[in-house]
Image (tube, helix red, strand yellow):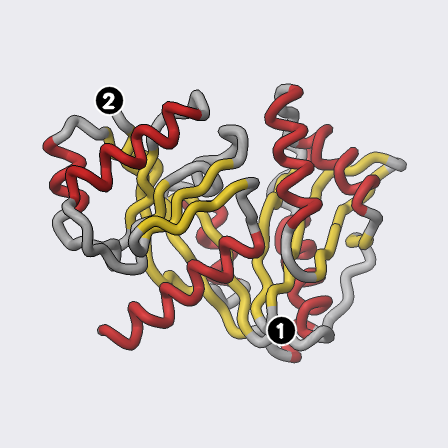
Amino acid sequence: MTDLWTAYRQLERTMYRAWPSFEAIEYDGWVVRFADGYTKRANSVNPQFGSTLPLPEKIAHCEGLYAERGLPTIFRLTPFSQPEDLDRTLTAAGYTALDRTLVMEANVDRRLDTESERVVHVSDEAWRTAFDRLHPLGPSDRAAHHRIVRTAEGARCFATVEQHDESIACGLGVLVDDAVGLFDLFTAEASRRRGHGAAIARSILRWAYGRGARTAFLQVHSQNDAARRLYRRLGFEIAYPYWYRLAP
């Protein structure tokens, strides 16, 4: 299990690079991330890499960092978070659990060579327009999202499905070393259950394989059964869960 946790901690680092925060503080083995409040992934304490200082002191320090920035304190916890009693300690302090999520992984290989004419790879700007239409955000969140995507480390694949000169589905791939992450897969409600999401995912995986990717990862809410079924059909398996603890 130790070797497995080591591999998953490395995957955590890869995910940070693919979905970056605007500021990250390394604090006694914890990674404290800030991105103007957009997504809990990029605005949470990630205690995956060890801990030596007294736990109450560390929690209080993190709470102060978020308070300084006008953000709620959120911990993102995994089965390998450190120290092992952190989740119990946060529970006792009144932190609320929410949004249990699954990290899924897959091998990327030549089985994805089949082309799909419905998917087009577009520019960053064209993709942002498609995303903003399919997943509207407020002005501050939209600006933060654009900044995260723009500063993601590695090559990016911006994919859409067009119909009558209008985007009806979109997805983003970010290639970090030999691993590709899938993000922001959205389909217009009237166009769902027609295979657009699967076509976009396969197109991104095929693009990534041609650039050296051999593994893929994504994150999906544990209760999103439709998405989980889709990803299983694409070869993804659950690696580990994570969940959040929100300060009272």
State the residue at coordinates (49%, 48%): 227
- The local secondary structure at tag 1 comes to loop
Q: Nearer the viewer, residue 235 or 68?
A: 68
Could you say where residue 74 lies in the image, as x and y percent from the top left? 34, 34
Residue assigned mark 1: 213
195 versus 138 height, above or below: below
Please, which residue is most extreme toward the bottom here?
A: 110
Instruction: Say which amino acid is labelled 1.
Output: Ala
Quarter that holds the C terminus:
top left
Q: Nearer the viewer, mark 2 or mark 1?
A: 2
Does 156 sit left or right of 88 as displayed? Answer: right
Residue assigned mark 2: 248
Q: Nearer the viewer, residue 22 or 160?
A: 22
- Residue 195 shows up from this direction: no
Mark linked to residue 228: none
Could you say where residue 244 lies in the image, as x and y percent from the top left? 31, 39
